[in-house]
Amino acid sequence: MSSDPIEGDIFISIDRVRENADNLKVKFHTELYRVMVHGLLHFIGYDDKTEEAQKRMTTMENDCLKMIE
C-alpha cells in the first residue's frame, strides 16, 4: 500500500443531492453521504464505467453507509 497522501476535490451539488434524495425516497443526509463515499471510492482507484463496476461501487457504497449511519 502506498504511503502517498490522497489529494483531490469532490464537488457536490446540494441541489442535485436534494433532487436525488427526493427521487429515490431517501433522506437528504443519506444521499449526501453516498455521493461523498462515491467520490472517495474514485480517489482510491475504483471506477464505474461498466455495469459490473457500477454494481461493485454500489455494493461498496452500501457497505460504507452501514458503517456511518
Image (cartoon, rainbow, N blue to C red):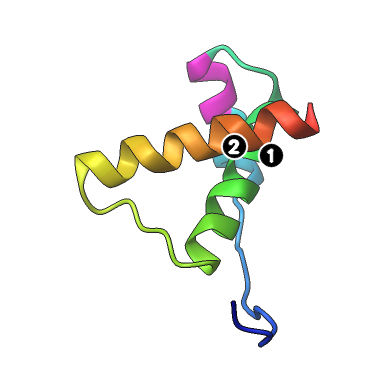
Q: Amino acid at mark 2?
A: Val
Residue 40 in the image: above or below residue 8: above
In percent of width and height, residue 23 lies at 48, 18
Is-magenta flag for residue 50?
Answer: no
Is-magenta flag for residue 23?
Answer: yes
Q: Residue extending furthest top?
A: 25
Q: Read off the magenta span.
A: 19-24
In percent of width and height, residue 21 lies at 58, 24
Which residue is more in the foreground, 25 or 64?
64
Q: Residue at x 50, y 17 (%)?
A: 24
Provide the secondary structure element on which disc 1 rests: helix
* Magenta residues, dominant SS class: helix
Q: Nearer the viewer, mark 1 or mark 2?
A: 1
Which residue is more in the foreground, 69 or 14?
69
Provide the secondary structure element on which disc 2 rests: helix
Task: Name the residue tied to disc 2.
Answer: 17
In percent of width and height, residue 20 lies at 52, 28
What is the number of the mark on residue 49? none
Name the image quarter holding the N terminus: bottom right
Q: Residue at x 60, y 38 (%)?
A: 34
Q: Residue at x 69, y 39 (%)?
A: 33
Label 2 Cα crowd, 10 Å radius (few <14 / some 14-19 / many 20+)? many
Name the image quarter holding residue 17: top right
Q: Residue at x 36, y 58 (%)?
A: 47
For the residues labelled 1 and 2, the Cα–Cα distance comes to 10 Å
